[in-house]
Amino acid sequence: MARRADRPRLLLPALLSTALGTGLVLSVLELHSVSAGLGRQVAEQLPASGVSNPVTAVLLNFRGYDTLLEVAVLLLALLGAWSLESSRRPPLARPAPPVQEMLTRLLAPLLVLVAGYLLWAGAGAPGGAFQAGSVLGAAGILVLLAGWRCRRLAAAGRPLAVLGPALFLLVGWALLLLQGSFLDYPPARAGLLILAIETAAMLSIGATLAALFVAVLGHGGQRP
Amino acid sequence: MAALNLLAAAFDLLLAAALVALAWQALRSPDLFRAIVLFIVFGLLMALAWVRLDAIDVALAEAAIGAGLTGALLLAAWARLQRAAGGADGETR
Amino acid sequence: MGAAELPGLLLLLASGLFFLAGTVGLLRFPDVYTRLHALTKADNLGLGLLAAALALQAQSLADAGKLLLIWLLVLVSSASVSQLVAAAARKGGIRPWRR
């Protein structure tokens, strides 16, 4: 527990956290008497959004601008990590123990498959670009930990990380030029556009997360 | 069934208490490695909480990113700190 | 709550017992290696019984197959990871507990 000398310093954060917690609990208890937010409007506009999962519709269509900013924030985080860490390439390959090798050989392709499925199913069921991208990132980390070196994939890291925000921006600008409104999908093409943006975002998120792991890992104890 | 509602409420209460207890333990743990492991477990329980709130997408994302990827990043950072400190002394704070 | 649900219920109870045994083992065993035994053996068997109980209530054969696949995946990954943890503990110098 807290050391005696720490107690006065911890008093203010403890008070503030208790106040915040109490405020949150009170506001959640208050929610029961308030009507359901925008659920009805989302359900009404769902057929025109291009997908049948309301979460994906809100993320990629109704509030697409927010998702664009989120994907850009991921890129910013990667830039931040790269500005602190000089090594861009994973540590030198060392042979992994056989058990880890077998596990990676089994899981890496399976994870790629699951990522693809999550991306595809995100249109109608829980899933989507972020979940698929994080599964891809996990596959990348597995491969890195097993010491596999794939030079082409490592070289594709930077372009892949940029692909997501770039495609999102391009679609927005193209729609701005053609229609006069940024990121306003025409309902006939909405499904296709969402799929394209989500695919680029998935690849981007996977590459960014794996690159973040490489940056945090550093030289892995071996000087190149 | 009223009994099922009672069971669900008890489960939710237990989950909430476990989340708060885990967060407290993770923040006040003197050992960094233990704090990271507790944070990963916190992420998993948080994913359960999202499922109980009927937000499956968020639960998937929380399990994959919050528990899995952030855990891996934190452990990599911890390993790097160990290497930088020489790993000889026991000071992990 | 018909008699058709009884096997599922029994499987669920058995799975709960195995998970409980695994947790008790995790808390009470003296060192890392014995705790890994409790985690992988008892918990995986509990998960298998849980998957069987859910498969009985599955809507289609595909769903039951997916549950079986989940169990097999957890088996493989938890067994491999526990071996890796034990190897790392051995390399880190942790000695097995002796009476």
Image (spheres, coloured by chain):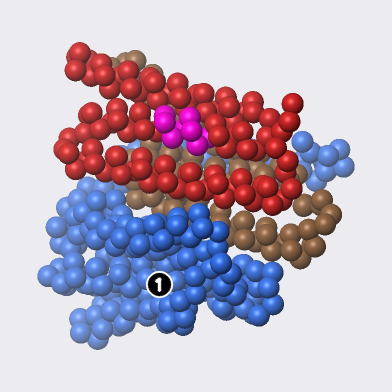
Q: In percent of the image, x 35 and y 28: which residue is there?
A: C49
Q: In percent of the image, x 69 and y 52: which residue is there?
A: C91
Q: Is residue B36 left or right of residue A61?
A: right
Q: Is residue C93 left or right of residue C40?
A: right
Q: In percent of the image, x 30 and y 30: which residue is there?
A: C52
Q: Is residue A35 left or right of residue A214?
A: left
Coordinates of residue A188 in the picture (x, y in percent):
12, 70
Q: Residues within 10 Å of mark 1 (few under 14, many from 20)?
A: many
**Type of amino acid under label 1:** Ser
| Residue B86 magenta-highlighted | no
Regarding mark 1 in the picture, which secondary structure is present there? helix
**Which residue appears farthest toward the bottom when viewing the image?**
A177
Q: Nearer the viewer, residue B20 or A105?
A: A105
Q: Nearer the viewer, residue B20 or C98?
A: C98
Is residue A78 placed above or below A126 in the rendered structure? Answer: below
Q: Which lettered chain is shown in brown?
A: B
Tell me the colour chain C is drawn in.
red
Q: Read off the residue under disc 1.
A: A204
Q: Nearer the viewer, residue C64 or B35?
A: C64
Coordinates of residue C39 in the picture (x, y in percent):
53, 35
Q: Is residue B57 visible?
A: yes
Q: Quadrant of residue B30?
A: top right
The stretch of residues the image draws in magenta is C39-46
Coordinates of residue A177 in the picture (x, y in percent):
24, 86
Q: Which lettered chain is shown in blue?
A: A
